[in-house]
Image: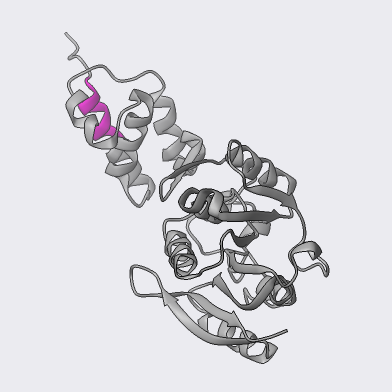
Amino acid sequence: MTAHRTLRDALVDAAERFASAGVPSPEVDARLIAAHLLQVGPMEVALRSRGEVPVGFDEMVARREGREPLQHILGVAPFGPLDLAVGPGVFIPRPETEVLADWGVRQLKLSHARPARVVDLCTGSGALALYVAEVFGADAEVIGVEKHDEALAYARRNAEGTTVRMVSGDVTAPGLLAEWHGTVDLVLTNPPYVPYTPDLDTEVYADPPQAVFAGESGMDVIEEMLPTVFALLKRGGLVGIEHDDTTSQAVRDVLAAHGGFGGIEVLRDLTGRARFVTASKLSD
């Protein structure tokens, strides 16, 4: 007689398969798949562990075992208080970017400008723009800019029901958002910044390459977008830029070489790595 297969059995099996496939967090991913299908929080899965295996679990496990990103399988990526729709064609927001979002909202809280004007360049799924809007509501006018149509469609889907404007645009093009030049309090950006390499985790290559890589140095987009950042910001306005682990000094150098930025500082992620550079506009 075949023993009854419980959810606990399925979770143990899934975690073992994920570990063998090189998935970084096998137990967590198995539990998140179960939670998604059961429509409960991850901590509640244990309470259902003696129950039936939810329909679709084995299919999702097979996809994750093949190193398809978990966020693509579930269709959403958590970002702070948000659950953002994601899929092929849009960059999956990473938890470390929440540090930049939190820095941005803390700076706006110190500002007396209301409504504050905020621009998220290379918005992707809309993560940074929507994080700010979630915190400030009507106290912030927020625009996200995205060049690629597939990503822009996700950004607009995620922005439904909010006041955030998601617009099509090239962040390196002169005259972008000309009507806002010299008026923006805060620019946030998580641009393509990875130096091209074939040696990254499998899941990275599921992101659209144009959202990840920026030439051999990883600096191509950051360098080319600085005139846009400078044009948008008002005097004293702030910018926060996410960058590769290896390019913190390079980002600080190009900001300093521009001549229009001061207060150039390193912002570290929760592991202590230099992952962001912040600065303010000195003058027009």
Q: Main secondary structure of the magenta part?
A: helix
Q: Residue furthest top?
A: 1
Q: Quick one: 265 or 213, which is closer to the camera?
A: 265
Relative to residue 271, is residue 18 depicted above or below? above
The answer to which quarter of the image holds residue 184 is: bottom right
Task: Specify how the rendered protein is coloured.
Answer: one colour
Point out residue 42 in the picture as x, y percentages from the top left corner: 28, 36
The answer to which quarter of the image holds residue 31 is: top left
Q: Quick one: 118 or 101, which is closer to the camera?
A: 118
Residue 140 in sight from this viewpoint? yes
Residue 215 in sight from this viewpoint? no
Point out residue 211 in the picture as x, y percentages from the top left corner: 64, 58
Identify which residue is drawn at 48% across, 35% down: 73
- Asked whether, in this view, residue 143 is left or right of residue 47, the answer is right
Identify which residue is drawn at 17% across, 14% down: 3
Q: Quadrant of the N terminus?
A: top left
